Structure formats: structure tokens, C-alpha cells
Image (cartoon, coloured by chain):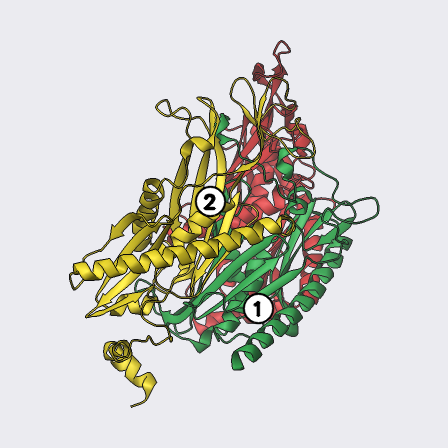
Chain colours: A green, B red, C yellow
Amino acid sequence: MSRAASTYAVPSYNATPDLSVKGVPPSLLSPEGSRLDGRLPHECRPAYMKTGAVNAAAGSAYAEFGQTKVIVSVYGPRESKKAQAFSDIGRLNCDVKFASFSTSVRGKASQGMEEKEYTGMLHKALECAVALHTFPKTTVDVFALILQSGGGDLAVVISCASMALADAGIVMYDLVPAVSLSCTGSEVLLDASMEEERWGDGGMIVAAMTSRNEITQLTMTGEWPSTKVSEALQLCLDACLKLAELMRSCLKEQVVAGGQ
Amino acid sequence: MVALSAAEVRFIQGGIAHDLRSDGRGRYHFRPFSIQSGVIPQANGSGRCKLGATDVIASVKAELGRPPAGRPNHGSLVISVECSPTAAPEFEGRGGEDLSLELQRALERSLLGGPNGAGAAIDLSSLHLLEGKVCWVLYIDTLVLSSDGNLLDALSIAIKAALSNTGIPKVEVLASTSADEDPELDVDNEESSPLDISQVPITITLTKVGRHYIVDATAEEESQMTAAVSVAVNRKGIVSGLTKRGGIGLDPSILADMISVARHVSQTLIPTVDAEIAASESRAAGS
Amino acid sequence: MEVEAFKRLYPLPFYERYLDSSVRPDGRPLGRARPTSVSLGAVSTADGSALVKIGNTTMLAGVKLEVMVPSQETPDQGSITVDFQMPPICSPLVRPGRPVEAASVISEQLSNVLTSSELVNLSELCIAPGKAAWMAYLDVYCLDADGSLLDTALLASVAALAHLQLPAVSVSEEGRVYPVSSSTSGDVSMEGAETSIKVKGNSISPRRRLKLGAAPFALTCMVHKKHLLADPCAEEETLLQCSITITMNQMGRLVSFYKPGGAVPATTAIVKECISLARRRAREVQQILKEALEDHIESPSLMQTD
């Protein structure tokens, strides 16, 4: 890639400073123990979720966690692609895409890879939660579009997708809330923002079916002393539990509002 | 795909339940493995690991590049995995691509460290040459030649062997350059220095079959798995990456137990791997 | 027969019965468009963005700016690249990996309308003549497709361009462009650039909005027998005989006229009626856009923090 003026990306000039511009890792925690966006280490971002965002879909959901904005729609169960072999259980087909303006730099080269990876991870997080045997020979499509990337994108996509599946009336064993976490020094930062993800020592994503007490997807990266692993895992599970409550109450509200 | 009869399935599952697997191993025993260093002469370092019938090759190529954004004092590692279609029929076309990406991401998670480079397999600051300008980029390319289960662990062993075999050429930065221009470098390919591989982790994959989990599953055993967890552990027992791979959900307490089993297994496996690598290095040097 | 069954079995007679009594199944009179809303600044990673809904049809438009070296022929002009996307979330007919024919058609139409309407004077995108100019990437994503896609996409594009702010930048002698942040004017380095920059002698262009020309607005009409329906939903688009899309600017001038074949020819009288509907609609939409802009400018702090 040439470093000519044409490849220079305009930094965002809104409230959150684009830290890639400065080139110096910021300190993620102030001496008083609050984070860059003012949260406490174990505090989640304000979350907003709504089902029924796309009318054309069988089920859909929109989620906004801090700066991260995601829309997911679910189609089906419908006929599987002709080329696919016979299957006596249903198929779950996932696809995750970034909108071109969702990141600070338009159309990053790594985006295609990230989309593929997220697609795979979303599938793994959901496949054991969906009762695939209830729609044999057919496919349920889960499509996600990340409208604005602001950290913890995959976790938000997973949570939002399970809401969309519920909205579509697909039988599931449980909702799948997902939470990401970043660690820096001796602190773990729950529900990490973009900056924290970029400059942390390590990260973790947990997706869980909370009422069955089962972890459906877990990845960790970076250096983790064993004591911190279990602490972080517990924190994520607690956060998943809270998120599950939020998701349930949101689904109930929609049903009540729809009934009237 | 592995095709098994109902009797074979019961034999495998029953064996695992009784801690005596079909090839005579216990649940936490690895298959015998062999390591061969320096198999690719044109690479800066290379290693081949045969683990049962699983056969993988890793090579390391050191090139000069730019430091990663925001970390002017670091070098970088780039990992790629290719599954040869000759290794298994399902690697042809898309199947191989998806598996390659999955393995690559799992290796990246365990070897590249956190977003700021903490916990990386190689101390990234040791790859730095000139602040913000030039650094070493290590391209770690791996190839799966033959597959009989547990690819990820075999790949991590091959990568460790390759890194241990790697010599980084000596570089002199010629001082007479202005701040704006790219500096002039003098690369001496004759003299090279080894990498510090003490932090390179080994991946231990625990495969859950029935109520038990096993290490180093063969392809037959993998076909019966309900879930698998890959944990990267270094010599000090520090976990540097973890990936859950498909299957059913896991209870958090079982997961925590799996992590501790992986750490326990690693503490006997890593010295064996290190000894094998050393033996193979001396063989390569002697010949 | 039950109404639902009748609708499923004989969709066209079902519609025609409604049309004969000059009303549509959703309760609208034939000439009325669906409720329309515009909200600006929906995506803060974009330099300008707008979310537009016409009925159920939802579009999100975002503008990203990059710096380019202007071409030799037009040294004092920037450029705008328009792209319209239909991701698989928007409709059951779209599957991942397969490009949609309709999307590329609309993309082309959008691009043509925006160019021929002279909405944006490209020389406004100039930073330093011959050295640097803004390249604006306007991407419109369809989030929910329920008919009248071009109308909605065009409104979203116009709104996103109206919301767009060009950041304050300084230009060095050699034509390198550096951002000027409001708090620290000057010494900001970027990825891959030198660590320190001399600001002296650089010309600084302030943060500003674009001055837009007369904005174009589109209205799609369906012709069916003797009826004329404005702003069809997806069902009406597939059932009824032929469509006409008219783009008018806010001065009431015709920008484009599009009739893609169809089962019946359009008479002069029908075309005239379409034009008068489109003119009325343009005034209506312009008012909605104006209100959205005023709301946005009155409470800019709100948009900054979200």
C-alpha cells in the first residue's frame, strides 16, 4: 500500500477521539479507577435492543451497545440450497457484514477476513442453542449488518442474533447473550469499547445460555494468569445473566405492545 | 469424513470411559511424535511435526517491514495455514478454506498475544530495528500434509520447532539518513542470531467425548466429539489463548476443569517437546 | 370466502376491488405517499449520515471522506462516488454472495440523478487546487426493502450530504493534508506519517457544511388500468402493471423520468398526472428534510455525544 496522500484517512472528529491517529497507547484507566468513557471497570455500556426492525424478515432485531450498532434479520425456515446434501436436521446459515462506513477507515483490507471469522463464530455460538431438529431439511438464515463498529462487535452480533431468532419464532433452548471483556495490567474491563479492545493486554468473548448454565462460545487472546481467567469468566457470565434479563424483558415488551 | 459402524462408535466411547483408548493410550496421553528441524533450506527456520498419522510443516521467513500501527517499538508475526487437498478429501475447495481460517485464527489468538502485543509467543520488541520505521516481520507459514486429528496441537509444535530453528540475520542501520526518508540498512545474511523461544506456547486441545475429555484425539475420536476446547499454555503455565471449537455448550465448571487439565498436561508435554526439538536441532547440525 | 384467503388466492382481483373504490389495502388514498421520516447523524463513524424511512422501506446512507489528488483535467474539483447496497438482511429475495440486479440498477440511477441535478458543486470539495481534494464515498444501505427503493435511496443520499461536514484541515506546501482538531490546533500526526509536523505556512480550511444546490426528490407511481398509485409498496410493485419514476428538484424542474417498459403504455394524461403528483411530493419531502435539518442544528450537542 502506498503512503500517498490518497490513502490518508480522515480521523473522526466527534466525541470519541480516534486513537490510531496519536500512535501512543493511552492509559485505559485513570488513577481514580474510571475508564476512558467514564465507566467503572465492571460496568457495561448502556444497551438498547429492539425486535422487529426489518419488516420484510421473519424476525429481526436492532441492538445498540454504546457506540456499537448492529442490525440482524432472520429468514426461514425455508428451502435449503439445491446444492446441499440431504440433512434430517435443520441448517443454520449465518452471514456477518460490515457497512462500509462502520469503521474509522473505510473498507479496511482486513475486513473481509474479519467478516468470515465473525460468520463462523456466530454460527458456533448459536448452533447449540437452536433446536435444529424442529425444522428438518430446511435452512434458517441469520444475516447481520454492523452499522457502526464501536468495540465488542461480535458479542453484540451474537446477542442481537439470538433476539432476532426469538422474534422469528425459531425454537431455541435459551437466548444466547454474549459479552466481551478486555484486560489491562491487573484490571479486567467488562464490555470493552473500541479503544480498550485495541490497546488491552488481552481479550475474551463469552456467549452463554444462562438458564442452562452452558457456555456456547468462548475465545481468549493475550496473556492470562490462571487466577484472572476464572475471575474474568465469572464476570462475563454474570454480565451475560444481566443481559439475558434485559433481552427477556425487551422481548416481553414487544409481545405486549404487539398484542394491544 | 470418518465413517464408523455403531459397534466401532461404542468401542471408542467405551474405551474412553474406561481410560483405555483404542490405540492403548490413557485419556491424557499424547501419541508419540517426531520433530524434524530445518526441512526447508530456503526459509529462515522450519520444522515438521509428525503426530501419529498427522503430519504438518511450519516455516518461518523473516522480512523487513513497518512496525504495526501505534506500536513503533514492536515487530510483528503473520501466520497462515494451508490445508493441502492431498491430506483429506474434505479439504478440497471451501471445506479446506474454512478449516484453514479456523486454525489460523486459533493460532493467531494463541501466538500473537493481546491487541497491544502482551503475551505474544516471541517478545515483539526484540524484533524492532528502528523506531517507527523498520522492524522484522516473521511470516509463519504452515502446511497440513496429512490429517489424523488434532491438527492444532501438531501445528503449534511444528511452529515452536520452526521458531527455535530460526536465525534472524544481523542488521546494521546506517546512520547517515535524514528523519524523513527510509533508512538504509545493511543486512548480513551470514551472521544470524537465534530467537528467544522460551515463551512460545503449545496448544493442548481437549476433546469431549461423552462425559470425559481426552487429549490428542485421532480423527476417529474427533468424529465422536461433542465439544472441544483448545488452550495455549507456555512453559510457565500461563494461558495465552483459548478457543472453544463448535459442538454443544459447556458448563463453566467443566470448562474451568478442562483449562486446569490442559495446564497440567502441558507441564509434562512441553519439556518433552523441548527435548525433541533440541535433539532434532543437534541432528540437523551434525549432518 | 374469508378475506385473507381471497387475498392469497386472487391477489390481483383483491387489489382491484380496493382500487375501484379509490382506496388501498393499507388505507391510503391512491395519490398519497406513505409516512416519511428522516433522522440525521445515525452513524457517528461516518462523516455524514442519515436514516430514512418511507413506510417500511428503510435506508441508511453514510458519507466517508478521503483525501485524493485531483485529476489533471479538473484540478479544483473533488469527487463523489455513489454506491447502493442491498445486503441480505433487507429482503427474503437477497442471498449472500449473489449480487442483486435491482441494486446495480438503482446504484446507476442514483449516481445519474445526483450528477445531473447538480446538487453538489464539486469544486466545493476542493482543499488546495491541483494538490488535494475530498473524495466522498456515499454508500446507501437498504435495511428493509418494501417498494419505492429509488425514492428512499435518493432521499437518504440527499439527507446524508446535507448532514455532511467537511472537517477542518491544514494543507502543507507539498499538498499533504493534516487534520486540525478543535482542542489542539496543529501537531497531530497520523498513521504512517511523520511524528511531528510544522504547521507554519500551511493554509487552513475550516470545518464546514456543503452548500447544496436544488435537491432532487423522486416519486415512483404505478399505473394499473385507469388507476394511478403513488409510492407503491413491494406487493403493489409486483402485482400492478407498470411503474413510472419521476425525479423533480425542489424548484419544480424535471430531473429524470424513468419508465422501464411494463405491460401498458403510459398516455400523455397519465404522465402529466404523475408529474403533478411528483411536484407535490417534492414539496412535501423537502419540508420533512428541512425540519430534520433544523432539529439537528438546534440540538447539535445531542448528536455529538451519542
Q: Crowdedness of circle 1 by 10 Å Cα count: few (<14), some, many (20+)?
A: some
Taking the image as shown, residue C255 lies to the left or right of residue B154, namely: left
Q: Secondary structure at mark 1?
A: helix
Where does label 2 land, which residue?
A: C161
The answer to whether dots 1 and 2 both sit on one chain is no
The relative height of residue A197 versus residue B211 in the rendered view (above or below) is above
Q: Answer whether residue C90 is visible to the viewer in this image.
A: yes
Q: Secondary structure at mark 2?
A: helix
Considering every residue shown, the one lying at the far top of the view is B176
Where does label 1 land, which residue?
A: B15
- Asked whether B209 or C204 is in front, the reply is C204
**Chain designation of label 1:** B
Q: Amino acid at mark 2?
A: Leu
- Asked whether A77 or B126 is in front, the reply is A77
Residue B157 is situated, as x and y percent measured from the top left of the image, at: 59, 43
Task: Name the image quarter holding residue A136.
Answer: bottom left
Q: Answer whether residue B216 is visible to the viewer in this image.
A: no
Taking the image as shown, residue C154 lies to the left or right of residue B120, namely: left
**Chain designation of label 2:** C
Q: How many marks?
A: 2
